[in-house]
Image: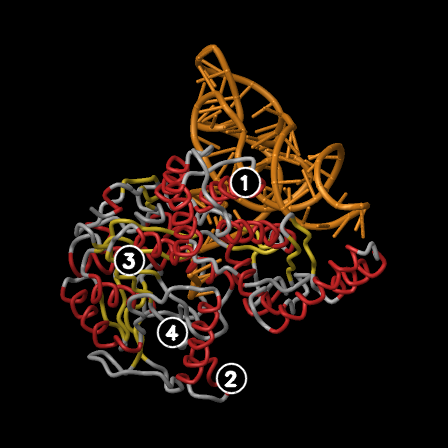
Amino acid sequence: MQLYEQQPISIYNSLSGQKEAFKPINDGYVGMYVCGPTVYSNVHLGNVRTFMSFDVIFRYLKHLGYKVRYVRNITDAGHLENDADVGEDRIAKKARLEQIEPMEVVQRYTVDFHNILNTFNFLPPSIEPTATGHIIEQIELIKKIIDNGLAYEVNGSVYFDVLKYNETKPYGILSKRNVEDLIHNTRALDGQTDKKNPQDFALWKKAEPQHIMRWPSPWSDGFPGWHLECTAMSTKYLGEQFDIHGGGMDLKFPHHECEIAQAEACNNHAPVNYWMHANMLIMNGKKMAKSTGNYILPNEIFSGDNPHITKAYSPSVARFFMLQAHYRSVLDFTNNGLLASEKGFYRLMDAINVLDSITPSGNSTFNVLEWKQSCYDAMNDDFNTPILVANLFEAVKFINQLKEGSANISEEDLKTLKETIHAFVFDILGLVNVTAEDSGTDKLSGAVELLIKLRQEARANKDFAMSDKIRDELAEAGIQLKDGKDGTTFTTN
RNA sequence: GGCGUCUUGGCCGAGUGGCUAGGCAAAGGUCUGCAAAACCUUGUACAGCGGUUCGAAUCCGCUAGACGCCUCCA
């Protein structure tokens, strides 16, 4: 019997606006697609948060025993600078500015993206397809949509006919918009367009002479519209209908709306059962934007080299910080928030380390099985990581009581507690036990142990001037001694 | 201008018709040669105004503010 049979999940579906019991199309299997990054610059921290949310969801589904195919694409072509005909491929523009090949830009930032995600301890997706690797599939989709009468060609470009589509199927069901509002509220176009209606979106764009990235097609040498790649790749790897489609809140409209329309136009049924949207990450109460300086690169968190933070934070601390908020809430990235999370994170890690030295005795004074289920309940309820973290701290409190000798635990419960806490902290939340690595058996550790021993001798001789000197000077060097019941330990953070 | 989300104690951040979220900080205590660390205990908050209800932070309305989308964006 698989765990998922005992742990029913409910997911907030953006499409219905409410939590729904999760039931995969094929029993035991989950297909999940998440819109990946456009690799034309360094990964944005907000990207990291979105992908982290789905990383945890991926991990949890796997933990429950589902066979998950997690597809997260790389957008390496196709974005338009703007809606007008003068639009040009975003990656090509950046390449010209930097005088290098477009694929060089793509390569550089793809590597950066993977590095950052690795640092944050992300699991790689099952498939990471690229837009440029699926041009043929995209062209086939366009042909199909044209055949179905829902797209038209003008001057070598192909557009999706939103109004015609809307005659039989509602355009805007995901973002709760209706076409009439869209018509009334469309901003004035700059420049002329080939579109019949401003709501129409490009499936294929004819390349201007200056375009470097271009592919032959029945309509022109050009490049695919942005929304199309996700439809092409999700269909190819997950089927015409799959379980979960995720992405950032900002992709809801128009991107995901267009994906639905494209898929419906091709296959005449909805592509996705559960739409999930991760909310935005803001910084100091405001949107992150390079232009205003309200911005931080992921790497700067690890180095501390950014005016918005006062120190460097380990990736796990940043990860823990983000997971203390629910994925559907706006999260405010602040130095104070990070500082608070850091303390809590190390307290959690310390407790987990202490767990190894706990010996069982008598009957448990804490209901471990009930606690374990409450951890599952938290995750089952739309992947509520903050509630899970709260539960973990209940365990921390209990572990500390065990250490102090003011609580008992049976042998069986101790085993369960260890297994559960490791599963949730390391396998599911994806945190890394940083303290254990830091104070491991390296050269520094040996030296500090010696000083601790010398200090112990000084204290035994009541030479407190010496013992305090050792303690204080180590503190200045960034090494903090912690006197406990069973001797002295140290931390370097 | 349109659409949507949100506003919780000193800070962060869950929850959601009646029952302690949790973390950080703070106060008191235990431990300690003194500290630090650690641990224990404590805190009664839900933007404002009105309404529904036996009862609302939780539902409805209005007001104010924040954020997002409407244009490339996770």
Residue that numbered label 4 is attached to: A85
Local secondary structure at mark 3 = strand
Real-space CA distance between mark 2 and mark 1, rounded to the nearest whole angstrom: 56 Å
Outermost left residue: A147
Task: Say which quarter of the image contains residue A29.
Answer: bottom left
Residue that numbered label 1 is attached to: A397
Residue that numbered label 2 is attached to: A97
Determine the chain carrying the residue at label 1.
Answer: A
Residues flagged by tags 4 and 3 on a common chain: yes
Determine the chain carrying the residue at label 3.
Answer: A
Question: Which dot marks residue A32?
Answer: 3
| Three-letter amino acid code at the position of disc 3 | Met
| Three-letter amino acid code at the position of disc 4 | Asp
Local secondary structure at mark 2 = helix
Real-space CA distance between mark 2 and mark 3, rounded to the nearest whole angstrom: 36 Å
| Three-letter amino acid code at the position of disc 1 | Lys
Crowd band around label 2 with a 10 angstrom C-alpha radius: few (<14), some (14–19), many (20+): few
**What colour scheme governs how the chains and residues are painted in the rendered image of this protein?**
secondary structure
Whole-percent x, y for residue A393 in the image: 52, 43
Disc nearer the start of the sequence (4/3): 3
Disc nearer the start of the sequence (2/1): 2
